[in-house]
Image: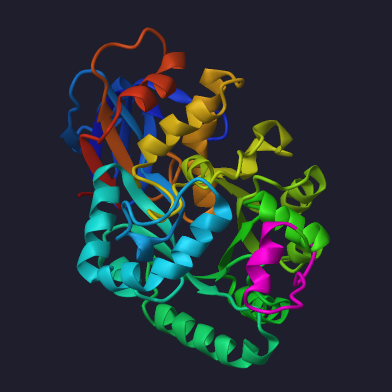
């Protein structure tokens, strides 16, 4: 049994409770959390871990949406406009995938871990990241992705998806979870989506999808016009959207689902997602680099469904969630800074854990002992300031624990 102390503990629970001069008692799971003096007296035999000055304890960070298979990209892809970027992905994908081997993905996961990401949702399009995700110490929700719009290819694509999912299922344990990703409404035939979602319902798997990322997607789904019309005309002369936005959302009824981006989603679509118990994943850096606009936070039906993620290095320069959170603060300059700091931290802890169905993300009794010990460069005047100062100053945590083990 261990007892770690800190000047401040950010529990990241529903009330964003902060404990000053706190302590956490843990083994593989958290046994108790509270005031330092009380717990030192109650657990005199626990192995004591003292923290340096100006220390802050918080849950390990959770990145619910990342594409590790594109980790070889740094300067290759074209940024600024969604369709130009998509064309560059299609044109240069094979080169990027060839450079992306197990070693590179493991290095990427290690870099994520060193910056405090102890759990992640990996969107796997090709299965190239399977072995690395199994080997890494982090908790991984491994989303096997399905896409394809040609009706004559549905059967073969579904068989391929089932085979990828089976490989992931065989590796499941307490840190690795198989899951399902439906790529997007513009790229995935509704029959494919429906078949894959039937499996997700039966197996109780978490589901992820991209939704309303760009104006091009909005125009295509609403009126079969815009940049996607030209894009699809290159492949098929009479291309039509596969479904409208609301029909697409309804496919996900009775699943445990994350809708990523939602930048161009309408209020009624956001409400429908919230009503079905879905989560929304915001990727501000990716959205900026692809020139698609930003999610309007005031349109969210409630803040509990909000999660924050980096997306992949195909549309980001960093998978460090602290970098993403800092970018998030600057993406929404009209919102209160203190409220944004809390929302961001809950978006990568409590809310993300709920979205991925993980037993972590909050420092409370019975949860997995996944947490970070960070230090600030100087004293913080009040508890109220801790979240914001942490976001502004932390680059890498001092100590990282997963299931009570120091990494
Ligand atoms: Zn994505």
Look at the image and give the residue range highlighted in magenta.
Answer: 226-246
Q: Using the image as rendered, state which of residue 111 and residue 407 is in the foreground.
A: 111
What residue sits 57% from the left and 27% below the top? 332
Q: Is residue 185 visible?
A: no
Q: Please, is residue 294 above or below residue 27 in the view?
A: above
Q: Position of residue 164 (x, y in %)?
A: 45, 82
Q: Residue furthest top?
A: 381
Q: Please, is residue 218 above or below residue 285 in the view?
A: below
Q: How many marks?
A: 0
Q: Is residue 93 left or right of residue 52?
A: right
Residue 232 is covered by the magenta coloring = yes
Q: Is residue 133 left or right of residue 220?
A: left
Q: Position of residue 317 (x, y in %)?
A: 35, 45
What residue sits 23% from the left and 63% below the top? 104
Q: Is residue 356 left or right of residue 254?
A: left
Residue 293 is covered by the magenta coloring = no
Q: Quadrant of the N terminus?
A: top left
Q: Is residue 299 left or right of residue 291?
A: right
Q: How is the image coloured?
A: rainbow
Q: Position of residue 237 (x, y in %)?
A: 72, 78
Q: Is residue 337 visible?
A: yes
Q: Position of residue 285 (x, y in %)?
A: 47, 41
Q: Using the image as rendered, state which of residue 326 and residue 43 is in the foreground.
A: 326
Q: Which quadrant of the view contains residue 102? A: bottom left
What residue sits 54% from the left and 44% below the top? 287
Q: Using the image as rendered, state which of residue 115 and residue 169 is in the foreground.
A: 115
What residue sits 54% from the left and 26% below the top? 340
């Amino acid at each position: 049994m261990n007892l770690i102390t800190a000047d401040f503990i950010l529990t990241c629970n529903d009330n964003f409770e902060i404990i000053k001069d706190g302590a956490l008692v843990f083994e593989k799971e958290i046994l108790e959390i509270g005031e330092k003096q009380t717990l030192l007296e109650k657990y005199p035999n626990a192995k004591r871990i003292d923290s340096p000055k100006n220390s802050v304890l918080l849950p390990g960070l959770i990145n619910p949406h990342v594409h590790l298979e594109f980790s070889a990209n740094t300067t290759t892809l074209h940024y600024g406009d969604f369709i130009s970027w998509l064309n560059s992905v299609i044109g240069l994908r094979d080169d990027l995938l060839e450079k992306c081997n197990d070693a590179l993905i493991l290095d990427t996961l290690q870099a994520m871990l060193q910056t405090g990401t102890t759990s992640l949702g990996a969107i796997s399009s090709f299965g190239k990241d399977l072995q690395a995700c199994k080997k890494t110490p982090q908790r991984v929700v491994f989303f096997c992705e399905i896409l394809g719009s040609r009706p004559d290819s549905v059967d073969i694509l579904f068989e391929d998806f089932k085979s990828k999912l089976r490989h992931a299922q065989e590796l499941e344990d307490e840190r690795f979870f198989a899951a399902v990703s439906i790529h997007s409404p513009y790229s995935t035939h509704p029959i494919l989506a429906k078949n894959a979602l039937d499996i997700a319902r039966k197996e109780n798997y978490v589901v992820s999808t991209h939704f309303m990322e760009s104006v091009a997607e909005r125009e295509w789904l609403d009126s079969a016009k815009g940049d996607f019309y030209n894009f699809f005309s290159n492949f098929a002369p009479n291309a039509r959207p596969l479904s409208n936005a609301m029909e697409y959302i309804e496919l996900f009824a009775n699943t445990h689902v994350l809708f990523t981006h939602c930048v161009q989603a309408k209020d009624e679509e956001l409400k429908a997602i919230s009503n079905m118990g879905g989560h929304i994943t915001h990727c501000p850096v990716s959205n900026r680099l692809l020139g698609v606009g930003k999610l309007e936070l005031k349109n969210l039906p409630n803040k509990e469904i909000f999660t924050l993620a980096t997306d992949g290095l195909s549309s980001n320069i960093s998978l460090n969630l602290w970098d993403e959170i800092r970018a998030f603060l600057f993406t929404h300059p009209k919102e209160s800074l203190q409220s944004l700091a809390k929302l961001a931290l809950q978006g990568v802890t409590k809310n993300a854990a709920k979205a991925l169905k993980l037993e972590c993300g909050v420092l409370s009794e019975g949860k997995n002992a996944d947490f970070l010990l960070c230090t600030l460069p100087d004293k913080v005047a009040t508890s109220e300031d801790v979240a914001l100062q942490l976001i502004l100053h932390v680059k890498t945590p001092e100590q990282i624990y997963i299931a009570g083990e120091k990494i």
